[in-house]
């Protein structure tokens, strides 16, 4: 019944998301590796990759106007064209400055495409279905991003990688062009006050920033570390895929534990666990088997921090009308962390691998300590954990089923024992 009434009508949207995520995963890893093999320094590679996340931030601010003006279908066509132009531009010209501009354009286009697709998914999902639709979206995004890593193991030329990325985008455009799904009416984006969010839910805001910092570092700088250590492109692809799958598999147990024991403890655990893994990656023997095992473990913690932070914010804020704008503000903080990571760590990795992991470890232990310093939220104030994709547009917040108080009550776990006093923090 769910498949026939809900999933089948929007299957074209899910397929389009899968195609885009596959190209996203492939190129996020490949570009840094290719530039390093061409002799560019880590600092230049970091700047080029940071441009992608700058484009993502700009998309969250400026893309809505075009979508509202010309509609979702035409906007999707325009953003797809921009993305293909940027991909093919990499083939035509090899210049670090031009590549930086092309990465900015592709980041803007990619996240604008996500906004279009998420708006469509939200329009076609009822309150009762949003939780399941979002869960399917998350699974598809993680799996497709992991699949993109394995494409890099094929014997393809650099030009072929960008052509494959272009083909994936064009196939997604074909699916959207022939869809019969009515175009949704897009509501204005209103950014929530960052200072107010920091004063009321500091752990959520800091957790979102650190989660973005880690994910930005993972996609842009970690492949360079693996390449530096093993000089094997296939090892990079396998490491990234295993880590992403670890992140996917962690969503539900981490969510269940956080619903039971609270976000503060799970965010602290994610911070301290990440600290241990970063230190092990620094001192462990140079073995591919150990590297893959540590990659799986680091994926478990890194990809859990942001959804835990969003859940923490929902625990603190009682007013359902705030959820959408709060989530967008946290997403902006997450995007800024992703943008900062390659800028900072690109310079650091070129200087010292030891310092690279020490900085990551300091961020991790800092998050853990900061989480433990916050007040515990009482059990009866806890919302419900919701898994989200590793990358998302600003429209994803509208799909959050926690906007429906009845849904939250139905999915809230039963607690034993007395609740502690509630103090927002």
Image (cartoon, rainbow, N blue to C red):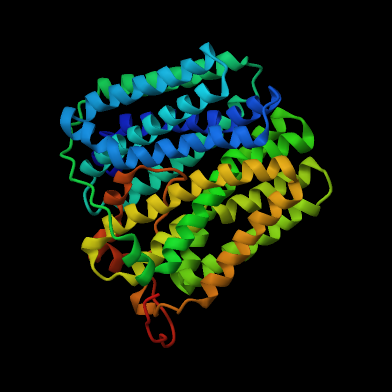
Can the viewer see residue 332 in this picture? Answer: yes
Which is nearer the eye, 363 or 385? 363
Position of the C terminus by quadrant = bottom left
Which is nearer the eye, 24 or 205? 205
Q: Residue drawn at (75%, 46%), measured in percent from left and top?
A: 352
Mark count: 0
* Residue 81 point in image, percent of width and height: 35, 19
Which is nearer the eye, 405 or 363? 363
Can the viewer see residue 7 in this picture? Answer: no
Q: Residue drawn at (18%, 35%), measured in percent from left and top?
A: 68
Q: Residue drawn at (37%, 81%), measured in percent from left and top?
A: 423
Position of the N terminus by quadrant = top left
Which residue occupies the extreme right position in the image? 285
Which residue occupies the extreme front position in the image? 97
* Residue 361 point in image, percent of width and height: 66, 58
User: In the image, is 111 to the left or to the right of 63?
Assistant: right
Question: Eyeballing the image, is 306 above or below 9?
Answer: below
* Residue 111 point in image, percent of width and height: 38, 36
Q: Residue drawn at (48%, 35%), measured in percent from left and top?
A: 51
Which residue occupies the extreme top position in the image? 92
């Amino acid at each position: 019944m769910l498949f026939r009434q809900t999933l089948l009508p929007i299957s074209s949207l899910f397929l389009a998301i899968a195609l885009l995520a596959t190209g996203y995963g492939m190129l996020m890893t490949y570009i840094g590796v290719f530039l390093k093999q061409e002799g560019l320094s880590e600092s230049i590679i970091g700047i080029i990759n940071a441009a992608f996340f700058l484009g993502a931030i700009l998309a969250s601010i400026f893309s809505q106007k075009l979508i509202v003006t010309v509609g979702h279908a035409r906007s999707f066509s325009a953003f797809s064209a921009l993305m293909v132009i940027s991909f093919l531009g990499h083939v035509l010209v090899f210049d670090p400055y031009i590549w930086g501009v092309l990465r900015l354009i592709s980041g803007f286009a990619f996240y604008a495409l996500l906004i279009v697709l998420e708006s469509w998914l939200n329009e076609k999902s009822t309150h009762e279905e949003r939780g399941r639709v979002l869960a399917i979206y998350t699974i598809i995004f993680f799996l497709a991003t992991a699949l993109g890593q394995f494409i890099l193991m094929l014997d393809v030329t650099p030009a072929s990688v960008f052509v494959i990325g272009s083909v994936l985008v064009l196939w997604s455009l074909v699916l959207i062009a022939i869809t019969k799904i009515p175009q949704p009416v897009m509501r204005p984006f209103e950014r929530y006050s960052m200072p107010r969010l920091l004063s009321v839910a500091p752990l959520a805001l800091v957790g979102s920033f650190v989660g973005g910092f880690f994910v930005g570092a993972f996609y842009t700088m970690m492949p360079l570390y693996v390449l530096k250590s093993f000089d094997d492109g296939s090892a990079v692809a396998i490491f990234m895929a295993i880590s992403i799958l670890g992140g996917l598999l962690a969503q539900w147990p981490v969510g269940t534990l956080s619903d039971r024991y609270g976000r503060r403890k799970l965010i602290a655990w994610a911070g301290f666990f990440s600290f241990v893994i970063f230190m092990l990656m620094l001192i462990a023997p140079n073995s591919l088997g150990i590297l893959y095992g540590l990659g799986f473990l680091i994926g478990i913690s890194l990809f859990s921090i942001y959804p835990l932070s969003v859940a923490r914010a929902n625990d603190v804020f009682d007013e359902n009308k705030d959820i959408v704008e709060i989530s967008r503000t946290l997403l902006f903080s997450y995007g800024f962390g992703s943008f900062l990571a390659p800028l900072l760590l690109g310079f650091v990795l070129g200087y010292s691998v030891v310092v690279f992991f020490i900085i990551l470890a300091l961020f991790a232990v800092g998050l853990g300590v900061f989480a433990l310093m916050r007040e515990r939220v009482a059990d009866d104030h806890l919302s419900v954990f919701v898994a989200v994709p590793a990358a998302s547009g600003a429209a994803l917040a509208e799909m959050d089923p926690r906007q429906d108080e009845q849904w939250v009550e139905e999915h809230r776990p039963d607690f034993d024992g007395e609740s502690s006093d509630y103090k927002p923090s």
